Amino acid sequence: DCEQDAPELIVFRGAAHPAVSVYPDPPVQKLVALMLELYGDEWLVIPAMHYRWSVLDQQRDFIFSEFGRMSLPDASRQEQIEVGERTSRMFSGSVPVLGITAETIPAIEAVYLEMLGHLDTHFSQYDFLLGSRPSIGDFGLMGPLYAHLGRDPVPKALMQERAPNVWAWVERMNAPVPLSGEFLDDDEVPATLLPVLQTMCRDQLPDVLDVIRHNALWLEQNPGQNIPRVLGMHPFTTGSATGERYIHSYAQWMFQRAYAHYHSLAAAERAAADALLTAVGGYEALNTAIEHWLERKPGQLELVEGCRQACR
């Protein structure tokens, strides 16, 4: 599963190039980068899948041909479309479990467009999230903002029209300049990122905390076993809408990356992080105790209970 392996692949590759790490050294910047990695990796999949499958009639041939091209790269376009229609069914079928329904779609679109506007303002002033070098947060956002929302015809046109600076960022991310750029001095987090973080803390973090509660209950009932990737459904909120979406156990593992970093900070660094978290509404979530820590084992997608040290 390339999505779930991506964080560890980045760590693995980054170890070979320590001079240009995607993880900022300054503590608050690193916290923000890890939070936005979580947001892109786990939450922006909702608008990404909505704008791919809910408007399929407007981009059908492109979507199916892209799926078909992965299976039969040398086949004709029509053959690729026919194959892609079959091989994509499992993905299109995931829309309801992500919470994408007629009742939630208006809020999903409103939140996405608002977030796109905030990012457009930010990227009108900065090349990347935290300066002139991409961070792990940029890579987390790049997954949905390029692979789905920046490639599929309908959301791509929307991005180009409504958020040209985000589109320019997508192009910069796809054309990296090796060994260039710096993170902002003095552990600065641009004020233009605060609305994005506020949206994340409002919508995603309550969902993650409930995932953690469900993971803990499952572990208590099934000691020593691997946690399934999905543990049923639970309520969620995005913007003005409420619905139900799947309980994705992996969300805890991603959240632990930011959580462990935050709890490793010395007093002065912690105070600066607390000020930021208070401003964006994330203080309570980052200070909620995690009783059952999770880790991944090589070669498996499921999670297992681990110790806190292993998760760091």
Image (tube, grey):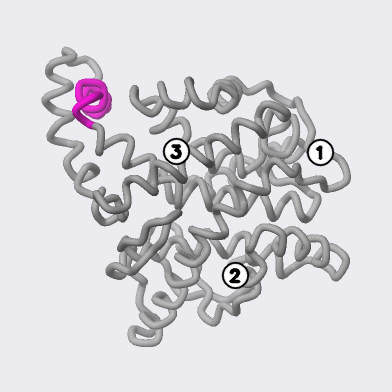
Residue at point 39%, 49% (across, down)? 107
Going by the numbered disc 3, the residue's amino acid type is Pro
Answer with the quarter of the image where residue 190 lies. top right
Q: Nearer the viewer, residue 260 or 29?
A: 29
Main SS, magenta region, reads helix
Reading the image, the residue beneath label 1 is 184
Badge 2 element: helix
Q: How many marks?
A: 3
Reading the image, the residue beneath label 3 is 144
Residue 198, x across and y down, in percent? 61, 54
Task: State the extent of the magenta-drawn residues as a range.
Answer: 56-71
Is 229 situated above or below 305? above
User: Is 74 situated left or right of 9 in this image?
Assistant: left
Q: Closer to the camera: disc 2 or disc 3?
A: 2
Residue 91, x across and y down, in percent? 24, 43
Going by the numbered disc 1, the residue's amino acid type is Leu
Q: Earlier in the sequence, mark 1 or mark 3?
A: 3
